[in-house]
Amino acid sequence: MDYLEIANSKTLYAIVLFILVFIYIQAFIFYRLATKRAKELGVSEDKIKKTKRAAMVSTVVPSLAIVVGLVTIAPALGIPVSWARLGMAGSLMYEIVVATLGGKVMGAESLGGPGYTPQAFANSVWLMTLGVFPSYLLVIFLLKKYKTVLQTKASADRAWQEIMATTIFISVFAALAIPYLFKGGDELAATATGAVAMLVMGLAIARFKLNWLKEYALSFSMILAIAVVVLKNL
Amino acid sequence: MTDSANIYQQKVHFIGKLTTTIFLFATLMLPLALWLKFDLLPSWEGFISGLGIVLSITVPALTAEFLCYTTVIGAAAYYVMGISGNYSNIRIPSALVALDATDTDSTTEEGELLTTMAVAVSVITTETILLAGVILLAPFTDFFSHPVLRPGFQQIVPGLFAAILVSFALKSIKAALVPIAIALVVVLSNQVSFTYMIPTVILISVVAARVLYKKGYYQGR
């Protein structure tokens, strides 16, 4: 039996749909819980509406990147596994690297290429699944304790807590964005466009008090980056 | 912490731990189905050697993510994000855009609640778009694979990361200078692999920021 017949079987679709429903339910439960508590605290309806709109708008464009990822890996891993991995706990780069590795250690030349047997496919799926387990274990066993430690430290020195949070946050995105600047080509064009677009909009928001733009600036920056790369390649 | 805040936090951790545990086992259903229904198992050697390599990459990366993102969003938001993934490219940005749009501080209880709502809405949005992507895979494949558009869609992530970096650097230029300078040095030195790039930049930046904080560099920022 061709491994892709198994990879696209109804059984796997049924499992992924079950997981999807579970994710929806969990998100809904936490949304309700947070909304109820926010109302107890007197958070305005307007703020809640703004939060929902901002989150939705800023999610659309990067979610399209996931669909692009799905289009990329579904021919090699089948739709259900690609869907589950990209939309539920994974990310495109991680899945491609680990799935390829899973095949290579089983003797395959490449992901979905010669030597990518049903057993190699099974190895890819096991490795993609187990590779992110540390993330769940950290959440289950350490999140509560770590949050308590952070809250204790915050009350001890709130100014330092704020600086540390900002430093950590900017470190993450500096480490993620800066390497693209040195890759040249499309990566450089997209990175520079995203940065310049956000810089201009950020300054405009501050100078002209364009508060409505805050919700859309990130999406506009990404759309501009896409447009510049498309134009560059025409 | 007030009694009602305590009750809320207890509920969050109980539901969060429970749902994450169920999800952990639910994700095993895919490989278990391959084994139990289709009799497909990898060789023991291939599995062990592959798992060793994968965990050597994921354990430090996931631990670094856990340590830093927990400082930015609340526990409830982290439980939601934890099972749906896409931390740095979708969930954290959407939570931060929501905080920015509502002028709310992430370290307050209100900020924690708004990031939870933002991450939950973001998860529902992504999963719905992905569901549409699966249903419409054939036309989507044509659209995203179009030779004119394809290069653009492949560069969404670099544009996103750069925009987030600038957006938050603008809010606190003084605080942003240290990590940006350190990231530049680390990248240009070419001594650190991508896997360890984020924890390395965080570690050096936090130590440098602590020294500068003690010297009064951040006063009046």
Image: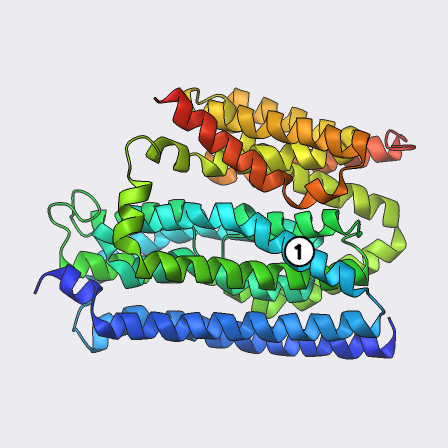
Residue A86 quadrant? bottom left
Vertical position of residue A154 compared to residue B25: above or below:
above
Q: Quadrant of the N terminus of chain B?
A: bottom right
Near-viewer residue (A5 or B122): B122
What colour-coding does the image apply?
rainbow
For residue A209, side relative to residue A174 (left or right): right
For residue B217, side relative to residue B50 (left or right): right
Q: Residue at x 64, y 70 (%)?
A: A31
Mark 1 surroundings within 10 Å by alpha-carbon count, few (fewer than 14), some (14 through 19), many (20 or more): some
Q: Residue at x 17, y 66 (%)?
A: A6
Q: Position of residue A162 (x, y in %)?
A: 80, 45
Task: Say which amino acid is labelled 1.
Answer: Thr
Q: Which residue appears farthest toward the left when viewing the image?
A: A1
Q: Residue at x 87, y 57 (%)?
A: A155
Q: Position of residue B119 (x, y in %)?
A: 61, 59
Q: Secondary structure at mark 1?
A: helix
Near-viewer residue (A157 or B145): B145
> Can the viewer see residue A167?
yes
Q: Position of residue A100 (x, y in %)?
A: 27, 47
> Can the viewer see residue A102?
no
Residue designated by label 1: B70
Near-viewer residue (B53 or A103): A103
| Total numbered labels placed on residues in the image | 1
For residue A112, side relative to residue B190 (left or right): left
Vertical position of residue B114 compared to residue A181: above or below:
below
Q: Quadrant of the C terminus of chain B?
A: top right
